[in-house]
Image (cartoon, rainbow, N blue to C red):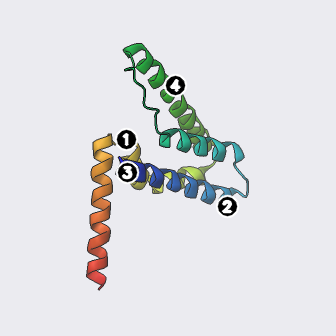
Amino acid sequence: MAEEGKADAQLFQLLSNLLQQVEALTNQEEVELRSKIEALGLEVTKVPSKSTQQLDQLEIAKELDKLSAKLDDVDEMISSAMAADPQVQSLLSGTADVWMPVITATADERRNFTASVGDNHTETEGETS
């Protein structure tokens, strides 16, 4: 679970860095987009309360709908930013190999991805020694 949280933190750090680059390129502060990224990051990292009752399928469906709507909002913001500014499109396209696997991965794939990144980092340190 900690590894999944680390992957999420890395993803939101990457999104924040990309937003900073976009802001630097456009000389415009993207306050709304920054706040939405931060809010989504907080939502993703929330630890659910330990409920004594199991969620029924209807409650699960409602929660999934809420999360889906939030993701749709982010998708719309990214799409509109890409359509409005070719530099944003170029930046996101150029870094897609970094962030797309994390976004589209299952929880197990994220854990494996985080583990393999850690292994590669360890190997690189070993080679430079």
Tell me which label, 3 or 1, sits earlier in the chain: 3
Asked whether 12 or 22 is in front, the reply is 12
Asked whether 16 or 75 is in front, the reply is 16
Q: Amino acid at mark 2?
A: Ala
Q: Nearer the viewer, mark 3 or mark 4?
A: 3
Q: Nearer the viewer, mark 2 or mark 3?
A: 3
Tell me which label, 3 or 4, sits earlier in the chain: 3
Q: Amino acid at mark 4?
A: Lys
Residue at 32 percent across and 41 percent down: it is 107
Quadrant holding the C terminus = bottom left
Which element carries disc 2, helix, strand or loop? helix
Give coordinates of residue 34: x percent, y percent.
Answer: 64, 47
Find the distance from the CA under tag 3 to the CA under tag 4. Answer: 24 Å
Q: Amino acid at mark 3?
A: Ala
Q: Is residue 100 left or right of residue 39?
A: left
Which element carries disc 1, helix, strand or loop? helix
Tell me which label, 2 or 1, sits earlier in the chain: 2
Which element carries disc 4, helix, strand or loop? helix
Q: Is residue 103 left or right of residue 18?
A: left
The answer to whether mark 1 and mark 4 are in CB contact below 8 A is no
Query: Around disc 1, counting alpha carbons within 10 Å, would you say few (fewer than 14), some (14 to 19), or many (20 or more)?
Result: few
Give coordinates of residue 18: x percent, y percent.
Answer: 56, 56
The answer to whether one can see residue 83 in this image is no
Asked whether 75 or 105 is in front, the reply is 105
Query: Around disc 3, counting alpha carbons within 10 Å, would you say few (fewer than 14), some (14 to 19), or many (20 or more)?
Result: few
The numbered mark at residue 2 is 3
The answer to whether mark 3 and mark 4 are in CB contact below 8 A is no
Q: Nearer the viewer, mark 3 or mark 1?
A: 3
Which residue carries the number 2 mark?
24
The numbered mark at residue 66 is 4
